[in-house]
Image (spheres, rainbow, N blue to C red):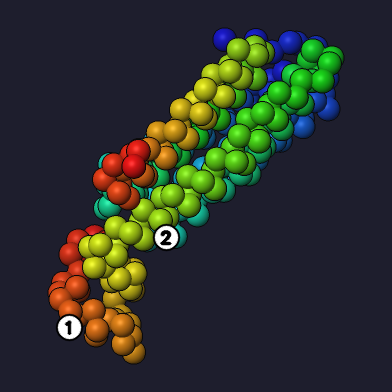
């Protein structure tokens, strides 16, 4: 069972509840983007919302709640905030570079994996790569 | 007012678990390996948020340390997996 004090002040409950609902909806939207967007380079933007705004709302709610509950400033959630702000771009950049390397190595173009079936015309680099045998066939098209 | 906070806590726990389920779907069906790594990273993030929610609902500061540890482990594992996918080895 939850252990919430019964005499919690109204302003605190309202603010914390608002921040919690806002953060959870933003988290849900971010992961829905991860699930629904058609292409990896678009999909990587979904969790960014979760990490920044969702985690920010939750950390702010936690800070406010414990500060008001213990009647002293409880700000060590700022540690998590700083850690996330430092590490999330590193992870995203490494994953993006991984995707670029792997796509280049497999000879896949971005236009091949998009859901848009129209071929991109006027790409002279494609013709050069095709003549050198780099891009015979785009394997593993996106099944969606 | 206690009821309001309880309802919002239950709602946000439900939403975070639903978000983890959506990530799990992407993890299971993701066409490439980097999709799966991204989904795993997001699952770590959602687990951290869930630890924060548990900390609020049980009014205990121990869960804060859980959240810190989960964030740290998630970062290390995601970076290691991304490096492995990029080069085929983790420490060059």
Q: Would you identify the image quadrant in which residue A21 lies?
A: top right
Task: Provide the chain ID for the residue under circle 1.
Answer: A
Residue highlighted by disc 1: A131
- Can you name the residue that lies furthest to the front here? B92
| Vertical placement of residue A128 versus B57, above or below | below
Q: Give coordinates of residue B63: x percent, y percent.
A: 58, 16
Task: Provide the chain ID for the residue under circle 2.
Answer: A
Q: Give coordinates of residue A96: x percent, y percent.
A: 42, 55
Task: Rate crowding at label 2 as few (under 14), some (14 to 19) or many (20 or more) other CA atoms within 10 Å.
Answer: some
Name the disc covering residue A54, or none: none
Residue drawn at x 24%, y 68% is A107
Residue A63 in sight: yes
Q: Give coordinates of residue B26: x percent, y percent.
A: 34, 45
Q: Would you identify the image quadrant in which residue B57 lies?
A: top right
Q: Secondary structure at mark 2?
A: helix
Q: Earlier in the sequence, mark 2 or mark 1?
A: 2
Q: Give coordinates of residue B5: x percent, y percent.
A: 69, 23
């Amino acid at each position: 069972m939850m252990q919430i004090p019964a005499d919690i002040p109204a302003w605190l409950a309202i603010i914390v509840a608002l921040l919690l609902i806002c953060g959870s909806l933003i988290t849900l939207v971010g992961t829905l983007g991860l699930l629904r967007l058609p292409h990896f380079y678009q999909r990587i933007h979904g969790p960014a919302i979760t990490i920044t705004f969702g985690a920010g709302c939750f950390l702010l709610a936690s800070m406010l709640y414990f500060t008001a509950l213990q009647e002293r400033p409880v700000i060590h959630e700022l540690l998590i905030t700083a850690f996330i702000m430092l590490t999330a771009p590193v992870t995203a950049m490494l994953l993006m570079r991984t995707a670029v390397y792997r796509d280049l190595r497999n000879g896949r173009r971005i236009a091949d994996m998009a859901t848009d079936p129209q071929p991109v015309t006027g790409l002279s680099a494609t013709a050069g790569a095709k003549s050198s045998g780099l891009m015979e066939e785009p394997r593993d098209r996106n099944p969606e | 007012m206690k009821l309001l906070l309880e309802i919002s806590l239950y709602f946000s726990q439900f939403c975070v678990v639903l978000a983890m389920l959506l990530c799990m779907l992407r993890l299971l069906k993701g066409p490439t390996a980097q999709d799966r790594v991204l989904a795993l990273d997001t699952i770590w993030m959602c687990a951290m948020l869930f630890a924060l929610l548990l900390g609020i609902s049980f009014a205990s500061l121990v869960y804060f340390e859980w959240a810190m540890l989960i964030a740290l482990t998630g970062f290390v594992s995601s970076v290691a997996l991304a490096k492995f996918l990029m080069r085929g080895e983790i420490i060059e």
